[in-house]
Image (cartoon, grey):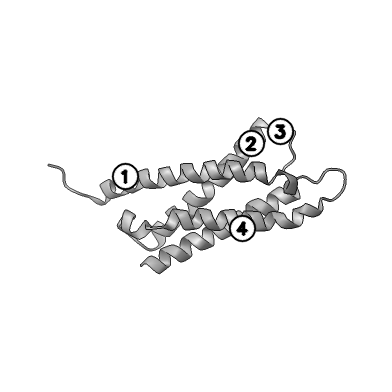
Amino acid sequence: MTQWSPLTGLKQYSLIVGRKMLFIAIAWVIVYWISQPFRHEGTFINPLMVFAPMIGALAGLVAGWYMATDAVEDAGMSGLPLRMILVLASVLPMWVIEGIWHLILPWRSFGFGGWMLLMAATILAMASAVWLESSQE
């Protein structure tokens, strides 16, 4: 018979977080390809870049909310350690997928629209993950 310890609880929660991170990464691949017209500048300034932060904000909001859903119950903890786990787990898949696509397709410029999209997604993912986790305490 094994006894429960905080480390076993964290191991069990890491499986849940890993599965959610995989879903966020898959969703970010879709966002990456959908947002291509909003990213590239080309010869002239792309007027569609204005909408890139809205797409990123919506994707980040969904990612952070999805990551923090039932987090306090699943993790068995709350507070700053859980918030740090949630923020990193909701933002890291987006940045990793962007980096992988940049390594695979180096001729595609990231552009200012890409930065706006990724920054809006990062900020909203952090905010929604922390807000939902704090409301579950």
Q: Is residue 54 left or right of residue 107?
A: left
Q: Is residue 87 above or below residue 14?
A: below
Question: Given this view, does label 4 or label 1 mark the residue nearer the observer?
Answer: 4
Packing grade of label 1 (10 A; few <14, some 14-19, many >=20) is few
Residue located 61% across and 58% down the image:
57
Q: For mark 1, what is the residue?
A: 11
Amino acid type, residue under disc 3 in the picture: Pro
Q: Which residue is mark 4?
A: 57
Q: CA gap, disc 1 to disc 2?
A: 30 Å
Q: How far apart are the alpha carbons under marks 3 and 1?
A: 37 Å
Looking at this view, is 98 or 29 the one in front? 29
Label 2 is placed on what type of residue?
Trp
Give the labeled residue for mark 2. 101
| Quadrant in which the C terminus is drawn | bottom left
Which element type, helix, strand or loop, lies under badge 1? helix
The answer to which of marks 1 and 2 sits earlier in the sequence is: 1
Could you say where residue 83 lies in the image, as x and y percent from the top left? Answer: 43, 59
Structural crowding at the residue carrying mark 4, measured as other residues with C-alpha within 10 Å and reported as few (<14), some (14–19) or many (≥20): many
Q: Is disc 4 in contact with disc 1, using a CB cutoff of under 8 Å?
A: no
- Residue receiving disc 3: 106
Indicate the position of residue 32 as horizontal and vertical percent values. Answer: 64, 43
Describe the element under mark 2 as helix, strand or loop: helix
Q: Residues within 10 Å of mark 3 (few under 14, many from 20)?
A: few
Query: x, y (%) of residue 67?
Result: 45, 53
